[in-house]
Image (cartoon, grey):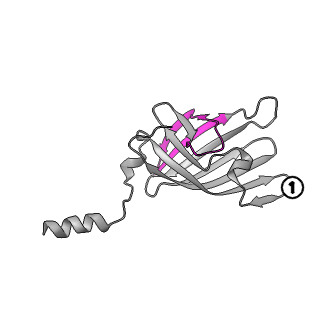
Amino acid sequence: MRICILFYLCIIPQTAFPGDFDGIKPLSGSVDKIIEINTFKIIDDVDPDSVGLPRNFFIDFQEKILRPSKDSLVRKTSKIYRVEHIENKLVLQGIDEGVENVDDGLAWSITISKKTGKVVLSASGDGVAYIVFGKCTPVENYKN
């Protein structure tokens, strides 16, 4: 019987539990798709590097920082100003000034499903908006 239980536990893919997205444990995230909307058109499947977004990132709730992974070309971190829980979602909000002397600042909001870890980020600035789809998984320890 114990062998069957052990076998069962080994073959089941590791899934996240609702407590994993409680706003306490750090999360590792990745970007799957970005859509850019501006005054003139909608651009589907935007490259994250071209808009200053890391492909892979970490959410550090203790420091309230969203930071890029080590392998990211983008090195900028973003401060998390607000963390809220609503229904089965974890919501993070922040503001970024962007590049110095360039009018590219924006406000952003990330919604993370507590059931699946799926992420939707929306960001808007002067005449442009981004919708980003991705996913998060809990991590015990990370070094960046």
Q: Position of residue 93 (x, y in %)?
A: 59, 39
Q: Nearer the viewer, residue 121 or 1?
A: 1
The picture quadrant where one finds residue 77 is top right
Which residue is depicted at the point 39% across and 48% down? Answer: 20
Say which of 23 and 142 sits in front.
142
Q: Residue at x 62, y 36 (%)?
A: 94
Q: Quadrant of residue 68?
A: top right
Q: Looking at the picture, how far across and down is residue 35, in whole percent?
A: 71, 57
Q: Is residue 2 magenta?
A: no
Where, by quadrant of the figure, is residue 99 drawn?
A: top right
The single residue placed furthest to the right in the displayed view is 40
Q: Report whether 103 appears left or right of 137.
A: right
Q: Which residue is mark 1?
A: 40
Residue located at (55% from left, 45% from top): 57
Q: Residue furthest front?
A: 71
Q: Position of residue 100 (x, y in %)?
A: 77, 29
Residue numbers of the magenta segment: 69-95
Asked which secondary structure carries label 1, the reply is: loop
**Along the viewing direction, whichever of 124 and 71 lies nearer the viewer:** 71
Report if residue 93 lies within the magenta region.
yes
In the rendered structure, the answer to whether residue 101 lies left or right of residue 26 reads right
